[in-house]
Amino acid sequence: MTRFFLKSMLAALTASLVALPLQARDTIQIVGSSTVYPFATVVAGKIGKEDRKDTGN
């Protein structure tokens, strides 16, 4: 019983630590050349429309 409890607690702790970096962010930063910029702005605009967020355009 104690081993099961310890394994369960370890699994819960691991899952919570893995989920921390995956929490929602308000911004997306894209770094690339000027040839990437037009495509990135189109994608950002589509994501902004779907999520109703400001894309800065």
Image (cartoon, rainbow, N blue to C red):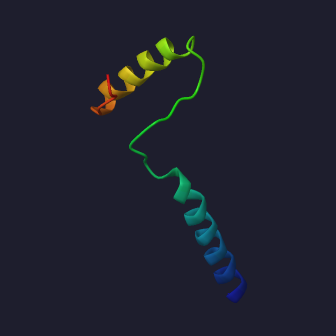
> Is residue 52 shown above or below 37?
below
Quadrant of the frame with the C terminus: top left
Q: How many labels does the image show?
A: 0
User: Image height check: is 22 above or below 30?
Assistant: below
Q: Toward which corner of the image does residue 18 lie, by quadrant?
A: bottom right
**Which of 24 and 27 lies nearest the eye of the viewer?**
27
- Residue 41, located in which quarter of the rendered image? top left
Q: Residue furthest bottom?
A: 2
Q: Which of 11 and 49 is in front in this view?
A: 49
User: Which residue shows up at 60% across the image and 71% down it?
Assistant: 13
Which image quarter: residue 12? bottom right
Q: In which quarter of the image is the N terminus?
A: bottom right
Residue at image x 53%, y 29%?
Answer: 30
Give coordinates of residue 14: x percent, y percent: 63, 66
Q: In this view, does 5 lie to the left or right of 52?
A: right
Residue at (42% x, 15% y) in the render: 42
Which residue of the protein is positioned furthest toward the right in this rendering? Answer: 3
9 to 20, vertically: above or below: below
> Of 30 and 17, which appears nearest the observer?
30
